[in-house]
Image (spheres, rainbow, N blue to C red):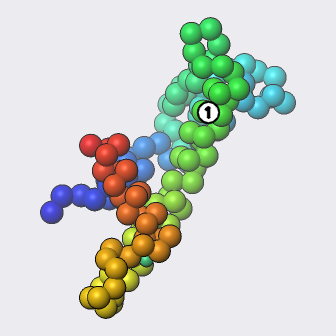
Amino acid sequence: MSQTPLQTLRALEAAATQGRWTVPHFARPKVGCECGYIFADGQDGMGSICDIHFGDEDEPKETAAANGKLIAAMRNLAPELLDLWKAAEEARLEGERVRLPNLESPCVCPTCKAVLALNAKAQEVMA
Ligand SMILES: [Zn+2]
Ligand SMILES: [Zn+2]
């Protein structure tokens, strides 16, 4: 059986640089540095994981700052978000298992709808 998107993401998360990823300096005005580097405390090399650009031909600084913050936050929350996805998917499958056959199928409760949408979108964007 092929991997589910959740399993694929788990493998990617495990293979990616571990540790907490930082928000680029330019997105943290108190730091007083305009560099766009994202680092992680679990990285092997001295270099950065990526460099967020802004200005001229790139995104406006405000948007670029949001991009850097989003990348760091989503990466740092990835393990817990994947756990939440797994728990919701298991609850959905258990619900389907015990459902009476005459009820609407699939379940349209907010949790099941959200998990189904997540599975479908993940399949699309990770194809
Ligand atoms: Zn810097
Ligand atoms: Zn449901």
- Residue that appears at 40% across and 58% down: 117
Residue 122 sits above or below residue 68 on the image = below
Is any atom of residue 11 visible in this view? no
Q: Which residue lies furthest to the left in this view?
A: 1
- Residue that appears at 32% across and 59% down: 7
Q: Is mark 1 on a helix, strand or loop?
A: helix
- Residue 38 in which image quadrant: top right
Is any atom of residue 104 visible in this view? yes
| Horizontal side, residue 78 vs residue 4: left or right | right
- Residue that appears at 47% across and 42% down: 17
| Horizontal side, residue 54 vs residue 100: left or right | right
**Residue 115 position within the rendered picture, expressed as x and y whole percent measured from the top left:** 42, 64
Q: Name the residue under label 1.
A: 68
Residue 59 sits above or below residue 9 on the image = above
**Residue 35 position within the rendered picture, expressed as x and y whole percent measured from the top left:** 67, 20
Looking at the rendering, the quadrant in which ligand 2 lies is bottom left
Q: Is mark 1 within 8 Å of ligand 1?
A: no
Position of the N terminus by quadrant: bottom left
Count how many numbered circles sit on residues in the image: 1
